[in-house]
Image (spheres, rainbow, N blue to C red):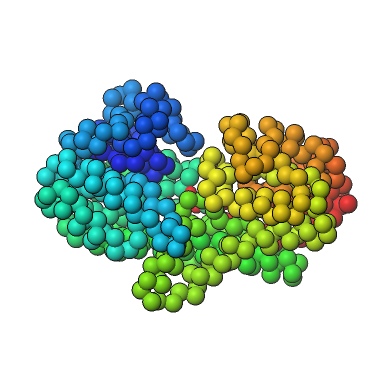
Amino acid sequence: MNKLAVIGAGYVGLVTGICLASCGHDVTCMDIDECKIDQLKAGRLPLFEPGLQELHDTNTAKGRLSFTTNPEQAVQHAEGVFIAVGTPPRKDGGADLSYIHNAIQSIAPFLQKDSVIIMKSTVPVGTHADVKKLLDRTAGHPVRLVSNPEFLREGSAVNDFFYSDRIVIGSNDPSPASFVEQLYHSIPSPVIHTDPQTAEMIKYSSNAFLAAKISFINEMAALCEAEGADISMVAAGMGMDKRIGEHFLKAGIGYGGSCFPKDTTALLYSAAQQNITVPLLSSIHEVNRRQPRVFIKKVLDRFGSIEGKKAAVLGLTFKPNTDDLRRSPSREIINLLVEEGAMVTGYDPVVSVSGKRVWQIPLAQTMEEALTGADLAVICTEWKEIIDFPLHCYPLYMKEANIFDGRNCYPVSQARGLPLFYSSVGRPVYKGI
Ligand code: UDX
């Protein structure tokens, strides 16, 4: 058992802190946001992540998890300090490191001489050296810094933590590296030791490669539509080849979220800084950027004009099992529908119940309510509730059942014989009306 601190109680920080407490460590999570810390102290998580609340409750009850806004209290006895603050994109595409700098300046004066600082935040390649200089200068003594990027997916982060495909530890010094390795001793995942810049690069390359798979399959989907082929079967056939793998080949309206868009842009920025041309990386980003527009073209091709039409947008979050709306492609879809004059109502299983008003559109409380009287439905997130809502029910509520499925939630065969129009991504269109 080690005494640990986690700086930043956002998505990565909270999952990391709570899961490390579950591994038996004594963890203090610190954040500058008093509201957030008050909420956590009162036992409520500020985000929705399956399984996390239960782990939070168990570990708090066992006295292994606490929350504070006080940097001194967080780090004064900590053997390991995780930095897990945000690195949002700047206007020029580079990563904004001001939260990292502020975090370091606030904790450095209180660090123990031999404590290990562990960088969880996604930072541009080469940042390690600069952060180390800042740490040493502010602490007044050499500080041991290790890069330990995270690969958690929202919606399955708890499972990803305990069953990660790999743990990456980047350090030029074997002693802090082995300290970090033993923190994860109860997790049966392979550990890879590298230098810090390689660890940082593994994180960016992994995200860029996954984003590439998505943009690739979306481009193939467009070809499938032109040739009358079915992208789901194409992806299944490709995925059976172990060299390709079956994951991340789901065609749709493009990737969103807090990582892929930001990290591909940051990598493009770093490449430009180094004067390296990266045409493949630029294309991944470009294909994704235009994917919502490509999808809405199908709506316009069907209707000619959607001026005054009632549109139900089903699913708002960037993927299911999260309440995260950051960089969700549904936002661009809604903007385009509104721009074309449609009257849009949204529905999302998690966002709707929160009572929040998002992106200036009204939210329905149920799927049925969103669909009632609608001329078209656009599916943006493959929530289980949406997948479980049978296609034959759409015509019961809609004025005219024109369904545009941006996440291929239904087999096209389910539409057969029904009085509806069903258009998805990379698969044959069904025209029952
Ligand atoms: C991602 C990485 O998977 C994770 O390793 C990293 O730590 C953070 O970024 P996350 O953003 O939570 O995780 O979501 P992920 O499941 O990877 O999905 C990202 C986006 O890609 C979503 O919008 C999703 O809908 C889309 N996607 C994913 C597809 O369009 N097709 C796919 O086949 C897979």
Question: Residue 393 location, x and y as percent?
Answer: 79, 39
Is 81 placed left or right of 202 in the picture?
Answer: left
Question: Image point 54% across, 51% down: which residue?
Answer: 327
- Look at 80% across and 37% down and name the residue there: 372
Q: Nearer the viewer, residue 171 or 46?
A: 46
Question: Which residue is nearer to you in this view: 418 or 149?
Answer: 149
Out of 168 and 42, give the one closest to the viewer.
42
Residue at image location 81% in from the left, 48% down from the top: 308
Q: Give the residue at x 31% y 55%.
A: 168
Q: Is residue 243 left or right of residue 60?
A: right
Q: Quadrant of residue 298?
A: bottom right
Q: Where is residue 292 in the image (x, y as percent from the top left)?
A: 65, 58
- Residue 386 visible in the shown view: no
Q: Please state which of residues 75 and 52 is positioned toward the viewer in this rendering.
A: 75
Residue 183 shows in this picture: yes
Q: Is residue 59 left or right of residue 88?
A: left
The spot of residue 128 in percent (x, y) is 26, 59
* Left or right for 44, reference 323: left
